[in-house]
Amino acid sequence: MGYNNLSFAMNEIFLVTGGAGFIGSNLCEVLLRRGHKVRCLDNLSTGRKVNIDPFMTDPNFTFIKGDIRDFETCNTACDDVTFVLHQAAWGSVPRSIEMPLLYEEINIRGTLNMMEAARQNGVRKFVYASSSSVYGDEPNLPKKEGREGNLLSPYAFTKMANEEYGALYSKLYGLDTYGLRYFNVFGRRQDPNGAYAAVIPKFIKQLMNNERPTINGDGKQSRDFTYIENVIEANLKACKASHGAAGQSYNIAYGGREYLIDIYHELCNSLGKKIEPEFGVERKGDIKHSNADISKAKEMFGYDPDWNFDRGIEEAIQWYKENL
């Protein structure tokens, strides 16, 4: 269970791209706490310096301010690195519909730059963030690898392109790549601000400020909300995965299903608020229902998440109470 029993050699170096972001900074924190050497690459376009400020005095931590769209930056960052945890990307389905060219540059070319740099530098494992958005309009639940539908957004396309490159780099060049299809990750340090903020931190902040949140659609859409600790476990266990598991993609979730309107009322109860939401139009490119079959990740590299939604949301709310 979890990742506490995993062991790595102390001379091994982890590179976390997007390390100043929500998921990346949590990965950096856990790795540093375990005594590992961590290199963080981020251009701070969506990541935030405040997320990594506590690590800047740690002798095991190195921050490189740089852009994955520049190959030489990627190549330098990968020097002597053992494991790459590639989180750098631009998220948000609706924003990708507005800015498809930028998403192609960052999410596709940037990821290809990182894979090539990892290959040239002899990186042992390349673990990268994919997304449940690759399932598109496939209606069946739970979502299962190998059963994808038509893509619904440029963001989803970029993640599918990453997976295709990952498979090629394993097959052609022997680079062990592992694509992690995250399902609606939430938890500490997730940014509640901006038009493209994720729904849980956005609702928490609005309710704490006695504002009336807007739910896109009827609130009956469901998601496999996944606490950050489960994602950390998946990344570290993928670093220990076999060569035979490389070149493939894996659902990373808890395997549950929560309805948005139920989550909203749960947040109201936890925060002691009685505020009725507004209901807006459905967002373009959104998937109506999402629930993951996580059996492949369990079988191939022992992924065994122990943070369910209720446990995760309780800790997340406490973090926002202390930090907003």
Image: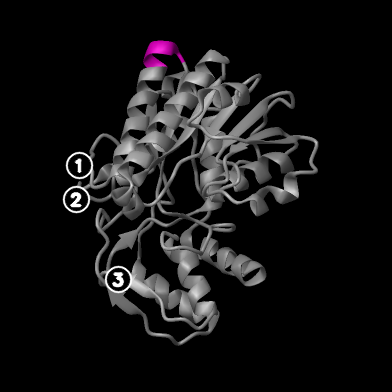
Residue 249, x across and y down, in percent: 38, 33
Camera-near label (2 vs 1) is 1
Mark 2 crowdedness (10 Å alpha carbons): few <14, some 14-19, many ≥20: some
Q: Are marks 2 and 1 in contact (CB under 8 Å)?
A: yes
Q: Nearer the viewer, residue 309 or 182?
A: 182
Q: Point out residue 202 in the picture as x, y percentages from the top left corner.
A: 47, 67
Asked whether the beta carbons under mark 1 and mark 3 sit within 8 Å of each other, the answer is no
Which residue carries the number 3 mark? Answer: 219
Q: Quadrant of residue 274?
A: bottom left
Magenta range is 170-174
Helix or strand or loop: what does disc 1 sit on? loop
- Residue 149's tag is 1
Residue in view at x 32 percent, y 27 percent:
164
Q: Nearer the viewer, residue 281 or 293?
A: 281
Q: Give the number of the disc on residue 139.
A: 2
Q: Which residue is drawn at 76% across and 35% down?
A: 60
Crowdedness near tag 3: few (<14), some (14–19) or many (≥20) residues, C-alpha within 10 Å = some
The amino acid sitting under disc 1 is Gly
